[in-house]
Each structure stands twice: as C-alpha cells, then as structure tokens.
Amino acid sequence: MMQNNHVETTEVKNTAERQVRGVRGVRVLARALSKSYGGREVLKSVELDVKPGEFVAIVGRSGCGKSTLLRLIAKLETATSGDIAFAEDGHQPETRIMFQDSRLLPWKRVLNNVALGLPKSALASAAQALRQVGLEERGGEWPAVLSGGQRQRVALARALVHDPELLLLDEPLGALDALTRIEMQQLIESLWQKRGFTAVLVTHDVQEAIALADRVVLIEDGRITLDQTIDLPRPRARGNLVFAQIEEAILSRVLQHPASAPDSTLGDISLQKSVSQVQWAI
Ligand SMILES: Nc1ncnc2c1ncn2[C@@H]1O[C@H](COP(=O)(O)OP(=O)(O)OP(=O)(O)O)[C@@H](O)[C@H]1O
C-alpha cells in the first residue's frame, strides 16, 4: 500500500507537471450565494471562483457554514438566493463527494462497492481505481475487514472510477490517525495531480489545508473573510519555515475573531493550538 502510494507521489511532483498533462477539472463559481435554515442565514452572499483544476480548501470554526457551501456546490441542497455555476455553457460536471465516513455498502465486496451503479463492464476500471489507491489485492474482501483508512481509500477509488471533473471532500480524513491521514493526503494530492480534477476540501485542519490546497478560504459567520493563495512547491514539507509561518498566520486570523456564530466553538484540536505552538509545526 505504502509502496504504491510512494510511486504515485513521486511520479508527478508539482503543479507545473500537472499542467503539462492537462486539466480535466471544471470551474466552480459561487455568485452571491446565500442559504438560510428556518430564517437563520448560514451563508451570506458568498462569492467564490475556483479555477479549473484548482485545489481549494475551506476552513473555519465549527458551524460557520463550510459543509453547507459544499452541499450547495454538490447540488445536494438549493440556495436561498444566488447560485453556483460551473462553466459558461451551463455544463453539469461529473461530481463526486467524499465524507468523513466511507459510506460503503457492507453487503457488497470491496470491488463491487467501487463499481457501484456501473455496468459489469466497468469492473476492470474499478479494479484499476483500486490499484491506484493501493488496494488491488483487497477487491474480493468485505468492507468490514478493512481499516478506517483503507475504507476511505475504497471510497476514493469509488469516486475516481467515475473520472470526476469535480471532487468534493467533506472532512474525509477527519476520523483517521495522524500517520494514515498524512498518507491519505499524499495519495489525494498525487491523484489530483494526475487526473487534473477540481478539488474542494472542507477541513478543520489548517495544516492539512496548507499541505494540499492552492488556496485556503476561511469562512467566518457565513462569509468568506480570507482567501489565501498557497504558493509553495509540492510536495510540501510540513517542517518548512514558510509553511509554519502561513499556518501561524491563518490560525491567528481564525483566533483573533471570537466565535461569531451562535453555535461556533473551538471544538477541534487544530484550531485549539495556540499560535506559538505552531511556530515549528510538524
Ligand atoms: N439541514 C439543516 N437544517 C437546519 N440547520 C442546518 C442544517 N444544516 C446545517 N444547519 C446549520 O447551519 C450552520 C452551518 O452548518 P455547517 O454544517 O455548514 O457547518 P460547518 O462549518 O460545516 O460545521 P462543522 O465544522 O461543525 O461540520 C449550523 O448552525 C447548522 O446547525
């Protein structure tokens, strides 16, 4: 598993190389996007322009509206006002979404989970997707015997088999241990570089956002209050001074604003780090 991951990570090293290979991703444009639940405005006229093939991470305190924005982009919900557009011609992109839990069907074997909803002829593509996530040997097993990280790899393969133009990631690594999480980040980055899809990642982990994204967007009380370009070469070394400085700057930005939404909390470890603790972040 690790070997495969390593090969894929080193095959395509940086954004420039990815650009040479072409971009399959779609542009995502949120225009004056608002969403209310029961009269309470959760997103307030959000403007966001994600370029084709770009990797954008959305961070912010719990309850600030990150997942709501992702669900609106996925068209799982409708906006109260404003809209999401994907391209000038109204094209509906092939979109896949990954959640914190893998949502595999326990009564289907791993390969059949990857090929879910596809004709039998797609089994070879499903096997290839499993190979890309380092699980080619596990196709005949039940999801229950896999680890949490392996199940998320299967979920990633299930998304990839559709060759998405847009991959939406709603805290997909949130339940994984630190090492597995870093391996998965590397895997997601290498597959994004190879495939060229547009990626939007919701995460509580500022370090993860900086490791993966071209831009880190901060949502506070339903509005985008920071849109930070991350101009670091890939793969990004977390021990790097510039990396740590960016992390510190984003965390200070988050921490300088006390909970503005009524249900905002600092309910996650990353945002609970004091700024001085992240000077030399791992
Ligand atoms: N279907 C819904 N009905 C009513 N309120 C909702 C619904 N979905 C979300 N909300 C509310 O909208 C606000 C934003 O929720 P959202 O899930 O987008 O936050 P988040 O930033 O992703 O939070 P977290 O980081 O904790 O997952 C919260 O106050 C939440 O309670």
Image: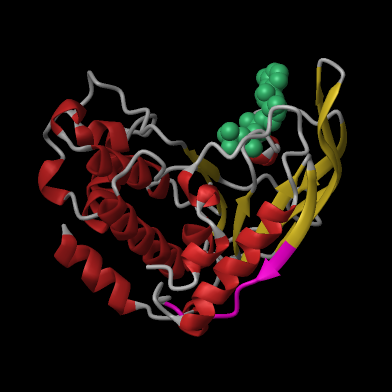
Q: Quadrant of the C terminus?
A: bottom left
Q: Residue 50: percent from the left, percent from the top?
A: 70, 60
Q: Which stretch did the figure color magenta?
A: 227-234
How is the structure coloured here?
secondary structure
Q: Quadrant of the N terminus?
A: bottom left
At horizontal 49% and vertical 72% (from top left) the residue drawn is: 279
In the depicted structure, whether residue 29 falls above or below residue 275: above
Q: Residue 74: percent from the left, percent from the top?
A: 63, 38
At horizontal 37% and vertical 47% (from top left) the residue drawn is: 161
Q: Quadrant of residue 107?
A: top left
Q: Is residue 17 left or right of residue 107?
A: right
Which SS type dominates the magenta stretch? loop
Q: Quadrant of residue 26?
A: bottom right
Seen as rendered, the residue at the extreme top is 38
In the depicted structure, whether residue 277 falls above or below residue 107: below
Q: Is residue 228 magenta?
A: yes
Q: Is residue 134 magenta?
A: no
In the depicted structure, whether residue 275 falls above or below residue 139: below
Observer-nearest of 248 and 97: 248
Observer-nearest of 79 and 149: 149
Q: Quadrant of ligand 1?
A: top right
Q: Quadrant of residue 182?
A: bottom left
Q: Residue 246: percent from the left, percent from the top?
A: 59, 72
Q: Residue 208: percent from the left, percent from the top?
A: 47, 59
Observer-nearest of 148 and 254: 254
In the depicted structure, whether residue 63 falls above or below residue 190: above
